[in-house]
Amino acid sequence: MKKPFSGELQALIDKAQTGSKEDIDIIMSHLTSESSFETTRYVDYALSLVINPDGFEQIKKYLFNGTLIQRNYASLYLNR
């Protein structure tokens, strides 16, 4: 089956669907003060797909221990 997306977005989606702690770290590493608008949208979409309990717990850790932008996106995820 062909995947509907490609490139960076598909890579983030694949990580989010696995949702391990390491995968969440990789997704969150894309959020920096230098991140493009496009990248932040990709990360936001990918985070919305995380359902693994380990991933959920890792996102909660970013809420208190991440950079400002990581905390913001963790908060968005947890408020959904």
Image: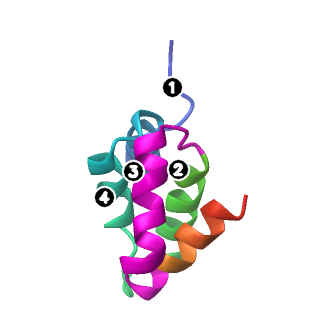
Q: Is residue 69 magenta?
A: yes
Residue at 47%, 82% (x, y): give it. Answer: 69
Question: In the image, what residue type sits under mark 3?
Answer: Glu
Mark 3 or 4: the one toward you? 4
Residue at 51%, 25% (x, y): give it. Answer: 3
Residue 8 position within the rendered picture, expressed as x and y whole percent measured from the top left = 39, 50
**Height in image: 52 above or below 73?**
above
Residue corresponding to mark 4: 25
**Residue 46's disc number:** 2
**Residue 8's disc number:** 3
Asked if the residue at tag 4 contacts the one at tag 3, i.e. Cβ–Cβ closer than 8 Å, the answer is no
Q: What stretch is highlighted in magenta?
A: 49-70
Q: Residue 2: in sight, yes or no?
A: yes
Question: In the image, what residue type sits under mark 1?
Answer: Lys
Mark earlier in primary sequence (2, 1): 1
Work out how far the residue at label 2 is from the one at label 3, CA to CA, in angstroms: 11 Å
Quadrant in the picture for the C terminus: bottom right
Q: Is residue 76 magenta?
A: no
Camera-side residue: 26 or 75? 75
